[in-house]
Image (cartoon, rainbow, N blue to C red):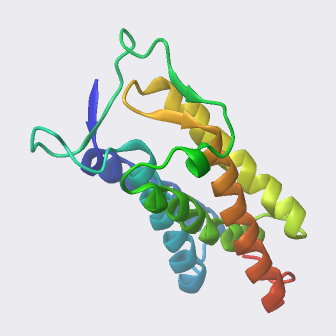
Amino acid sequence: MEITFLLLAVIALIVWAAVRFFICAKKDEVNFKHEAFLFLIFAYCLLVARVVYFPTKSPDGRMVRMIIDFENMFPPMINLTPLTFVSERYPGWWINVFGNIIIFIPAGIFIPMVSKRAKNILQTTIIGFGWSLLIELSQLLLFDRCSDIDDLILNTLGAAIGACVFFAVGKSGKRL
């Protein structure tokens, strides 16, 4: 099965809009500032999905797609050796390292804004770790993606940095 990012984004947008419509209809009010913020988080999650699940380039020039192939996904590609990027340098390694950190900084900012459980930096970082772990486990279903302990470490570091920024600014009491 092949899924393009455009198809995924359109389906996700339709589902998101329907859910938000019914929630707002049930409340019988619309807070446009709140809805705009939630849309920003939705767009961020789409960006993360684009980076995580879709290759950056298509070798055949076709639209980039996610391929789910149950026959070819075993054995899954997994790296369980921490910090391999320190010893195994390859072209563009620094983009992978800093990209994994940077992409999760917004998560560390958004999580305490929407979760009552994220009351401090540690709790926010743990939730960020959980989200990254979910992403890495979900990549096991894709034969052309690799689940990597380094991604988990670097994503968690990014979430921790974002949490530090959020709590340093002093917005911990304001949730949406």
The image quadrant where one finds the C terminus is: bottom right
- Left or right relative to 105: residue 76: left
Residue 165 vs residue 10, the one in the foreground: 165
Counting from the top left corner in percent of width and height, residue 53 is at: 41, 43
Residue extending farthest left: 61
Counting from the top left corner in percent of width and height, residue 89 is at: 48, 49
- Left or right relative to 112: residue 158: left
- Residue 137 visible? The answer is yes
Which residue does the image show at 62% across and 62% down from the upper left? 26
Does residue 72 sit above or below 170 in this rendering?
above
Residue 70 vs residue 72, the one in the foreground: 72
Counting from the top left corner in percent of width and height, residue 114 is at: 73, 68
Which residue does the image show at 79% across and 77% down from the upper left? 164
Which residue does the image show at 34% across and 45% down from the upper left? 8
Residue 132 vs residue 1, the one in the foreground: 132
- Residue 113 visible? The answer is no
The image quadrant where one finds the N terminus is: top left
Residue extending farthest top: 71
Number of disc labels: 0
- Left or right relative to 126: residue 12: left
Residue 154 vs residue 141, the one in the foreground: 154
Counting from the top left corner in percent of width and height, residue 37 is at: 56, 78
